[in-house]
Image: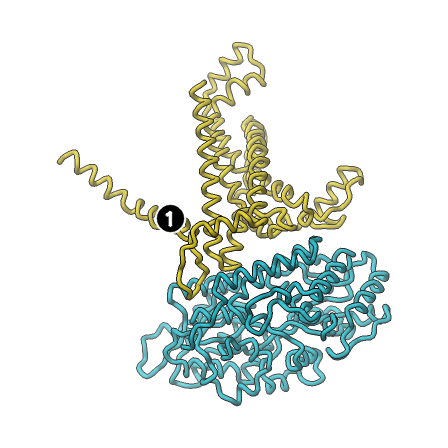
Amino acid sequence: MSAATPRCAGWLLATPALLGLLVFVALPFVLAVVLAFTNLRLGSPLPLEFVGLEQFRRIFTDPAFTRALLNNALFVLVVVPLQTLLALALALLLQRRMRGRVVFRTLFFLPVVFPLSLIAVVWVLIYAPGPEGMMNSFLALVSGGAWDARDFLRDPWLALPAIMLTSLWQGAGFQMVILLAGLQAIPGELYEAAAIDGAGRLQRLWYVTLPQLRNTLIFTVLVTTILAFRLFDQVQIMTRGGPRHASTTVMFEAVQAAFTRQQVASGAAMTVVLFTVVLLITGLQRRVARQVREVA
Amino acid sequence: MLCALLLGGCSPGDDDKTPGVTRLSVWAHAGQAAERAVLTEQAARFNAGQSGIEVDLTFLPERDYNAQVQAAAIAGELPDVLELDGPYLANYAWQGHLQPLDTWLSADIRDDLLPSILAQGTYNGRLFGVGTFDSGLALYGRRSLLEAADAAIPQDPEDAWMAAGFDALLRRLASNDPDGAVLDLKLNYPDEWFTYAFSPVLQSAGGDLIERENFQTARGVLNCPNAIAAMGRMQGWLQDGRVDPNLDDAAFVSGRVALSWAGHWEYRRYAEAFGDDLVLLPLPDFGHGAYTGQGSWVWGVTTHCAAPAAAVRFIEFLLKPDEILAMTAANGAVPATGSAIARSPLYREGGPLRLFVTQLAGGYVVPRPQTPAYPVISAAFRQAFADIRDGAAVEEALDRAVQLIDRDISDNQGYAPAPAP
């Protein structure tokens, strides 16, 4: 009895949160899975029918969706390592005691605070086509006039990289802050000991900072991967998936299907695929990270 | 500001229910501030002008208006009177959310309406909605630049430029232009613009978005040889650099281009910039007549409404010439009735925007297809247009759109109309 009461109380106290999770997280997800096997159209008076794997067959034969999956993969492969490295570099720079450190931290963190839609609109202007566009004139200046003005967001080769650059600029500040916190948690004695042992700066970075920062790094890589798979705002505002699907993503295609074309079932199938992919990849990352720890 | 207006619009509705008074909830899109102000005043005038009906007005943001209304429809919480975007009318009617108005709307008003308003509001042979204004689409041009390029200025849709002549004119204009981009197609506008503004090109070429007999297939209509040729011609303008990307929406007013493919809403800004040098011209004729766009917001009565007669009285109030003129003075659109047009300084005979009335009343417009498949048709055509703009093979792009449209129609069993309520 005395053992059961606290357990009961525990469940009782957790109930509001659990209910919230159930209603707002579990239920929509289960619904999405169920709907992916139906023919649901937004607001249709026709009876709901189960169509088996038809929606999945369709999205995998849709060149826009397969291109979206590929783009998502490319985006993750490029942005996650680059953004993590950039954030680490910024964090290492800003960790040192120097004048104006707070100002720089604030500046680098600022893009994270701005709404993504605002940032996307600003970058549309930066990528303006023609030689007067900010990015074009900057590249012309840097290259000594050798750069030919390009229409970045309508160029099949440059649209996705343009979005990647925007995302890097916007997202790096967030990881920087997390990594900074991680850096500050590293005990100073370790560096002192390393210095006494005659370790140089690079060696201290390699043998002290990085191993100590391991868990923080794993966390930031995981979070960045998940956020990268959800890429949507920049695509919606900057390129609308174009030109010819060169910059489309799974989220963008799902929103197009469910809300523009009102084909909810098709959109649900796309999100289920996305969820599965993200689950597999984050699972893989965790497993690799754990194995490394065991070896170490 | 929206909050203040909402409160202002709703305050009479917050009182306790008065017996003998029919209360109507009304949803409208929050357009420009001037439009909101006029509609708020109109609701107040209607409430003050009679004692049997009390209108309670709510504005919803324009950006996601359709999505919000759809959500409300699924939740069974639609208002009595609903403003909706014209091309979505068939969708709502098919879903069974709208009541036909034919039996309620007075014959006098009906006969006074522009044919385009009736066409837009009709689904499956019945009238489900009426607008108090319509939209106009045409070319705005700079007379001085056109005359310098030896262009004859057409006065009427009948003598619109033929497409080949238009090509040649673009070339001549380009030779007088520093960057060669002489045409503004409002490429900066969001999604629906592309179907609104460029599906008339298909009709002018002898094609269409879909066959209009039964709305069952786009095959052989959207991808017919004439439609492919017309879209190929537009692709030519884009690829030859004749079209300004117009990122700043100032291509025309800043003098970068000689021609702007745009709607009635640009008149004020354009006239301010160029005064007498501004001319309004019909769109080019791609072989089967100079067709152009139409359609705007319409009022409908939902199946949720228990007092359709009262709801229609409110709509009829909004259709009074004075009320139409108050609204169109605020938003610049084409008044929906002949009697209001006759009193409109912009649109009456000899007015600077008379061409829009000629187009709407003279059969030079085709409504966007009144079928529940419209959201898919529009999405498919927009994608095709975007691909064509980006250099895709025109035939392939249109074939893919046809596939998307036809599959959606068969998925929904032909969108057979629900039996009349």
Point 60% across, 61% down: residue: B402
Occupied quadrant, residue B87: bottom right
Point 45% across, 46% down: residue: A272
Which residue occupies the extreme left position in the image?
A1
Q: Is A23 situated left or right of A284 in this image?
A: left
The hue used for chain A is yellow
How far across and how far down the image is residue B219, in percent? Answer: 61, 64
Picture layout, residue B96 above or below residue B176: below
Q: Is residue B266 visible?
A: no
Query: Which quadrant is home to the N terminus of chain A?
Result: top left
Residue type, numbered disc 1: Val
| Image mark count | 1
Point 85% across, 68% down: residue: B149
Q: Is B26 situated left or right of A148 in this image?
A: left
Name the chain letter of the residue that bears numbered label 1: A
Picture layout, residue B410 above or below residue B304: above
Picture layout, residue A273 above or below residue B117: above
How far across and how far down the image is residue B83, in percent? Answer: 49, 72
Query: Which quadrant is home to the C terminus of chain A?
Result: top left
Q: Which chain is cyan?
A: B
How far across and how far down the image is residue B23, in percent? Answer: 37, 78
Occupied quadrant, residue B171: bottom right
Q: Name the residue tied to disc 1.
A: A30
